Image (tube, rainbow, N blue to C red):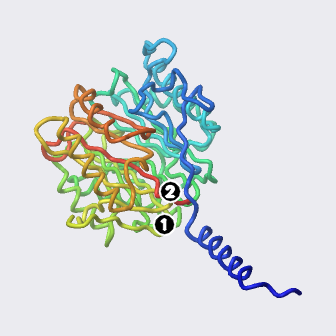
Amino acid sequence: MKTLKNSQFLSLITLSLLLFSGFSTGQAQEKRIIRPGAQTAPSSKPVPAKPGLISPGVLIGDTLFLAGQGSRDPKTGRHPESFEAQVKQSMENLGAVLRAAGLDFSHVVKANVYLTDIKNFSAMNGVYRTYFKSDPPARTTIAVPALPGESQIEITFIASRSSRRVIRPEGLKPIVNAPYSMGVMAGETLYLSGQGSVDPKTGQLVQGPIEAHVKQTMENCGAILKAAGMDFPNVVTANVYLSDMGNFEKMNQIYRSYFKSDPPSRTTVGVSALPGETPVEITFVANRAAKRVIQPEGVKPSANFSQAVQAGGFVYPAGRVGSGEDIGAQVKSAMEGIGTVLKAGGKDFSDVVEAKVYLTDISDYAKMNEVYRSFFKADPPARTCVAVSKLVGTAKVEITLVATAGKSQ
């Protein structure tokens, strides 16, 4: 065997260290904007067609975030007449984005459905279920005062190319046999369906004050976590929906008792109604990977939520409300606040892959867009915007984002 020269030996050592470093820290995830009808260039008629404002889909690694789709037909620019036809059109719009990413409905792991009338819940389910032959995704459904473009329904998805496993906790089942799974694992990430305060032992809403409803809701979420081999410390982000925001502080008292330390990031909004007449609905994203809490310097920690949590390749900032007299000032304030959190985690707005915007007045939609779009130089995230009944305090807007952590899951 020939003896290696010093230079050759050092080169091999350097190469080995680089390879080891790459495998141990993970490679940057590829980020790709998905536009239906586009191959290598943007389509002349993307869905939706709002350059610099919304990307129809953002594929990061194996995870696809889809923008909320209403019922407007991209061919005619109009909404179908019947509600059932509107649900179908929303699903077809989403299907176009899935196909453009090389996926289909079987890859969907989480759905959010927004209805302007909770009475349409059953009619929506009748159409929605036809798109899933088996094992539908986890889902959260809420009623809201209004949606952009006068749509009566908006739906948004998260889809994944990772291995997919449905979580079926004993005793828990969907309301009125609605088409959703209680939880879906995609790789190391668990997506939970929104849980209300139905007692699985009786099949009825628990009796008592709001505290009893929040406790039952959290217990239902905990049953799904445990069925997936997880627990509350694995939760990275949460959404809380209240039919009465006057219950905000009482909800907090029970909610925070389930997190001994490092609570997940969180967004809480008031809604028009919830399925089954539950006064609270809560949904989680959990992850088996070690999580890192991001706490900007000078910001006092909260027992109710973390400013942001990083886990499984993504950063989940908490929802941010704005301050100021008008909607423009509040949007700017909210986005700058989130920017501070992203910076503390070594990220910026170019890393954002998904956004949700909640407005107390849908007529502020255009003004919100003017300020919002200024924070994205190119390739904005997939986005959903809905009106809500109430936000914390006098806030007119709350914004929540998801960003890529820049590492493979």
Residue 61: in sight, yes or no?
Answer: yes
Residue annotated with mark 1: 230
Is disc 2 placed on a helix, strand or loop? strand
Amino acid type at image mark 2: Leu
From the image, which quarter does the N terminus lie in? bottom right
Residue at position x 39%, y 50% in the image: 195
Measure the C-alpha gap from mark 1 to mark 2. 9 Å
The spot of residue 94 in percent (x, y) is 52, 31
Task: Tell me, yes or no, if residue 170 can be seen here.
Answer: no
* Residue sitting at the far left: 325
Q: Position of residue 108 (x, y in %)?
A: 56, 42
Residue 147: % across, % down: 32, 27
Given residues 263 and 354, the one toward you in this image is: 354
The residue lying toward the viewer, choosing from 123 and 23, is: 23
User: Which residue in the protein does label 2 denote?
Assistant: 190
In this rendering, position of residue 202 left or right of residue 42: left
Give, as a three-letter code, the residue at label 1.
Answer: Met
With 277 as the anchor, is 12 left or right in this view? right
Query: Which of marks 2 and 1 precedes in the sequence?
Result: 2
Q: Secondary structure at mark 1?
A: loop
Residue density around tag 1, few if under 14, some if 14–19, many if 20 or more, within 10 Å:
some
C-beta proximity under 8 Å, tags 1 and 2: yes
Q: In the picture, residue 79 is in which quadrant?
A: top left
Where does the C terminus fall, quadrant-wise? bottom right
- Local packing at callout 2 (Cα closer than 10 Å; few below 14, some 14-19, many 20+) is many
